[in-house]
Image (cartoon, grey):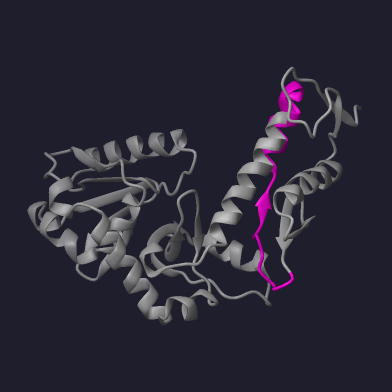
């Protein structure tokens, strides 16, 4: 079995030779990737951690967080001639994101985002017991509402260390995220025309479309127009589907379309259907 793949490209960055041997084994690949990211982030000590994962730490305790190599490794396994260039681009992209993230945070950057509860729990475990906590609150169907900091190129969770910098409490950061989100989007009534029988509508073109379920009270008007049968689906963070759930045909139409949208998305979120109730969102089985 080959232990190395050889990257041969006509145009490669000066840090790569025309025949750069790139380890095909996961451990060797991770070590090489760490070296490349290290060049982009000299103030961090970049090292492999778990399988195909890197993490960098500064002397002040600041961390890059977990940097996954799964996609770039899979690409290199399939595209040896272009691996060197792709790995350089990966390292440069990571470097730009981390450098941007290191700039001072502001209250205007806070948003609320919807993420799978399992994903939030996994991130907490990966961070370890000594790391500053991140926050998440259940919103239904295995989903959590989380406060995030929105940078130009990336988004990251708000952590405990961020609260003093933002001068807010845990409760206030959730409220701030909702306020900022509400101020950045059109009113719900302007983007949710009432769907006909067995039909559904969609909210797209918004980075935080799925986060609109945080505005539970805003949905009451539409729910009343649908005689209490409002259902929604969140196939991706930037897609929210809604419709009339009064008939099995309408429910199944929404479910089928939502699942297809999730499959096509690079960031699938949930295949669950949520039903609006006066007390909150409930999963529709």
Coordinates of residue 98 in the picture (x, y in percent): 60, 55
- Residue drawn at x 25%, y 61% is 182
- Residue that sits furthest to the top in the current view: 10
- Residue drawn at x 51%, y 74% is 162
Which of 258 and 16 lies nearest the eye of the viewer?
16
Q: Where 17 sits versus 49, above or below? A: above
Is residue 278 highlighted in magenta? no
Among the 4 quarters of the image, the one containing residue 183:
bottom left
Coordinates of residue 38 in the picture (x, y in percent): 76, 51
Coordinates of residue 179 in the picture (x, y in percent): 28, 67
Among the 4 quarters of the image, the one containing residue 45:
bottom right
- Residue drawn at x 50%, y 64% is 157
- Residue that sits furthest to the front in the current view: 14
Whether residue 76 sits left or right of residue 277 in the image: it is: right
- Residue drawn at x 80%, y 20% is 8
* Total number of numbered discs in the rendering: 0
Quarter of the image for the N terminus: give it: top right
Determine if residue 120 is in view.
yes
Coordinates of residue 234 in the picture (x, y in percent): 36, 48
Per the rendered image, the range of residues in magenta is 59-84
Which of 88 and 169 lies nearest the eye of the viewer?
88
Is residue 72 highlighted in magenta? yes
Whether residue 209 sits left or right of residue 68 in the image: it is: left
Q: Where 76 sits versus 125, above or below? A: above
Determine if residue 140 is in view.
no
Whether residue 215 sits left or right of residue 17 in the image: it is: left
Which of 4 and 151 lies nearest the eye of the viewer?
151
Which of 23 and 50 lies nearest the eye of the viewer?
23
């Amino acid at each position: 079995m080959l232990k190395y793949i050889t990257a041969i490209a006509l145009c490669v960055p000066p840090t790569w030779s025309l025949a750069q041997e790139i380890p095909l084994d996961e451990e060797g690949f991770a070590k090489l990737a760490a070296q490349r990211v290290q060049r982009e982030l000299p103030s961090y000590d970049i090292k492999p951690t778990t399988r195909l994962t890197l993490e960098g730490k500064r002397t002040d305790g600041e961390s890059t967080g977990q940097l996954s190599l799964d996609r770039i490794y899979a690409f290199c396994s399939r595209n040896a001639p272009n691996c060197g260039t792709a790995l350089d681009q990966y390292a440069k992209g990571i470097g730009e994101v981390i450098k941007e993230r290191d700039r001072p945070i502001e209250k205007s950057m806070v948003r609320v985002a919807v993420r799978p509860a399992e994903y939030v729990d996994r991130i907490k475990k990966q961070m370890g017991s000594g790391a500053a906590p991140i926050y998440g609150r259940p919103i239904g169907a295995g989903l959590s509402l989380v406060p995030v900091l929105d940078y130009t190129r990336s988004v990251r969770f708000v952590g405990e260390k961020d609260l003093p910098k933002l001068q807010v409490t845990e409760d206030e950061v959730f409220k701030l995220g909702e306020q900022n989100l509400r101020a950045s989007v059109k009113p719900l009534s302007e983007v949710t025309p009432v769907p006909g029988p067995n039909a559904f509508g969609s909210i797209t073109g918004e980075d935080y479309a799925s986060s609109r379920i945080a505005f539970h009270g805003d949905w009451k008007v539409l729910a009343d127009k649908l005689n209490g049968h409002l259902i929604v689906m969140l196939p991706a963070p930037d897609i929210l589907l809604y419709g009339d759930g009064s008939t099995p045909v309408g429910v199944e139409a929404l479910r089928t379309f939502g699942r297809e949208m999730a499959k096509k998305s690079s960031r699938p979120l949930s295949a669950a259907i949520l039903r609006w109730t006066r007390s909150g969102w409930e999963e529709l089985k």
